[in-house]
Image (tube, grey):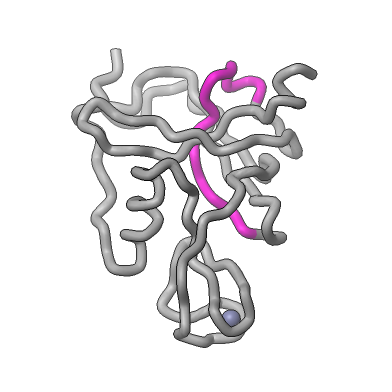
Amino acid sequence: MSDQSLAPRPVLTPLTKPFWDGAAEGKLVIQRCRVCAHFNHPPFVECTNCRSSDLGYEAVSGRGAIHQRAIVETPLAIPFDDLPYACLLVELDEQKHLLVAGNLVNASPYEARVGRKVEVVFETQPDGFVLPQFQLAADEAAA
Ligand SMILES: [Zn+2]
């Protein structure tokens, strides 16, 4: 049985805090360049497209497609022992190669196949910490 109270939490920095604050409000918030409008994720000190340091944050749709996935069937570390589960890299609809990590929820991990459409959902942990996760998009779940 998984004990999520033992799960490590991210250390918030000025760069990453807007992402986690957004999750706590039910929004997927991604860093965006104010000069060229490029999204950067993970957030970085300068735009990965034009190198500007004029960066802001904005909420995105949370919709995308599975770009890569790994299905974990063997316990790797406590408390991530609620097996099996699927780790995803999701390419968001907003921009090619804009990848966000999360697990597939509300479906068998074996439903995680490259190219399937997913949407973000927010999973509140027992300690109140909110994790962005992904579920199959409505049209995929019906397929
Ligand atoms: Zn830029």
Quadrant containing the N terminus in the rendered view:
top left
Residue at the extreme front: 25
Residue at the extreme right: 143
Q: Is residue 71 above or below residue 101?
A: above
Q: Is residue 89 left or right of residue 55?
A: right
Q: Is residue 105 above or below residue 21?
A: above
Magenta stretch, residue numbers: 98-111
Residue nearest the viewer, comparing 10 with 123: 123
Residue nearest the viewer, comparing 113 with 127: 127
> Is 99 covered by the magenta stretch?
yes
Instruction: Report x, y in % for residue 63.
Output: 64, 43
Q: Is residue 32 above or below residue 91?
A: below
Taking the image as four quarters, which one is ligand 1 found in?
A: bottom right
Residue nearest the viewer, comparing 77 with 137: 137
Instruction: Report x, y in % for residue 7.
Output: 25, 34
Quadrant containing the C terminus in the rendered view:
top right
Instruction: Report x, y in % for residue 106.
Output: 54, 19
> Is 87 covered by the magenta stretch?
no
Q: Residue at the spot x=26%, y=58% of the render?
A: 12
Q: Residue at the spot x=65%, y=28% of the render?
A: 136
Q: Residue at the spot x=54%, y=67% of the render?
A: 40
